[in-house]
Image (spheres, rainbow, N blue to C red):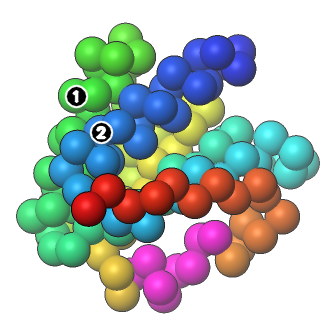
Amino acid sequence: MKKKEKDKLVEAIVAGLQEKKGRDIVVADLTTIHDAVCRYFVICTGGSPQQVQALAHSVGETCRTQADTKPLAVDGLRNAEWVAMDFAEVIVHIFLPDVRAFYDIEHLWADADLQNIPNLD
C-alpha cells in the first residue's frame, strides 16, 4: 500500500470514528515492526454497544465514499464489545471501555509509533 493510499484510508477511518463521536482514537504505525499482522491499527472507544455498532457502520460508509474501499471482514458486531474491521493493511479495533482496558492493545504494540487523535467535543 502506498503512503498516499494509506493516508487516505486512515483519514477516512478516523473521520468515520469522529462522525459518531468515537473517543480516545489512536493510530498505531506498525510498519517498523517485523512480522506485524498489518501495517496500521486504528483503535477507538465507544460508550455503549449501540455506539460501537454505529462507529463500525460509520467507518464502513466513510471508507466506501472517501477511500473507495470496504473492509475485507468485520467481526464482533453481534456483541459489540470489540469490533474488528480488517482492511488488509489497516485493522480497526472499536472497543467498549472495559474491554479496551483489559486487552490494552496499545501496550502490546508499545514499539509502534502511536499517534493520539484529539477527541472532538
Amino acid type indicated by mark 1 = Glu
Amino acid type indicated by mark 2 = Gly
Describe residue 72's horizontal placement relative to residue 111 as left or right: left
CB within 8 Å, label 2 to label 1 = yes
Residue 83 vertical position relative to residue 39 in the rendered view, above or below: below
Describe residue 76's horizontal placement relative to residue 8 as left or right: left
Q: Quadrant of the C terminus?
A: bottom left
Q: Main secondary structure of the magenta part?
A: helix
Res. 16 mark: 2
First to last magenta residue range: 99-106
Describe residue 3's horizontal placement relative to residue 12 as left or right: right
Q: Secondary structure at mark 2?
A: helix
On whether residue 102 falls in the magenta region, the answer is: yes
Q: Secondary structure at mark 1?
A: helix
Indicate which disc, 2 or 1, sits on the residue closer to the N terminus. 2
On whether residue 48 falls in the magenta region, the answer is: no
Q: Residue furthest left?
A: 50
Residue positioned 88% across, 45% down in the render: 32
**Closer to us: 74 or 27:** 27
Residue positioned 48% across, 87% down in the render: 102
Describe residue 5's horizontal placement relative to residue 24 as left or right: right
* Residue at the disc numbered 1: 61
